[in-house]
Image (cartoon, rainbow, N blue to C red):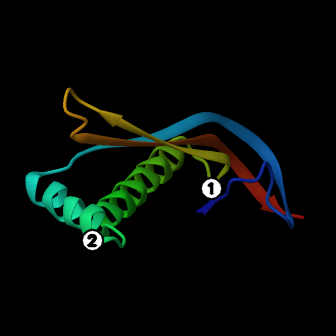
Amino acid sequence: MIITTTPSVEGYRIVEYKGITYGEVVSGVNFFKDFAAGLSNIFGGRSNSYEDELKNARERALEELEGRAAAKGANAVVGVDTDYEVLGADNGMLMVTVSGTAVVIERI
């Protein structure tokens, strides 16, 4: 399945719109990741633990988006947008949402 942030796919034409589709993942950030990130803040550098969690959450959200689009009979999703939010009383949860338009495309 083609998933793109653009409104169209070069070399293809959209022949049917299946509607807006989405994927979302809410992921908890645990004490050990917080601790490792705190060390990065003190000593400098990147927080690999948070970056890995963000990457995994984004990939899972895209997989969910693809599955929901396929369930609608789509073979592509165009206009994909990704959003990130921090949730919870102590900001201990990360939410990643992706949305786009599920479509059927065919080669020109």
Q: Is residue 38 left or right of residue 59?
A: left
Q: Work out which quarter of the rendered image holds the N terminus and state it.
A: bottom right
- Which residue corresponds to mark 1? 75
Is 33 located above or below residue 96 in the figure? below
User: Cα distance, mark 2 to mark 1?
Assistant: 47 Å
Residue sitting farthest toward the top? 89
Q: Is residue 6 left or right of residue 60?
A: right
Residue at 63% across, 43% down: 102
Residue sitting farthest toward the front? 42
Q: Answer with mark 2 or mark 1, whichever residue precedes in sequence.
A: 2
**Residue count near mark 2 (Cα–Cα under 10 Å), binned few <14, some 14–19, many ≥20:** few
Q: Is residue 47 left or right of residue 79?
A: left
Residue at 36% across, 56% down: 60
In terms of depth relative to the viewer, which is nearer, 66 or 58? 58
Q: Work out which quarter of the rendered image holds the C terminus and state it.
A: bottom right
In terms of depth relative to the viewer, which is nearer, 39 or 87? 39
Whole-percent x, y for residue 79 in the image: 70, 46
Residue at 30% across, 60% down: 50
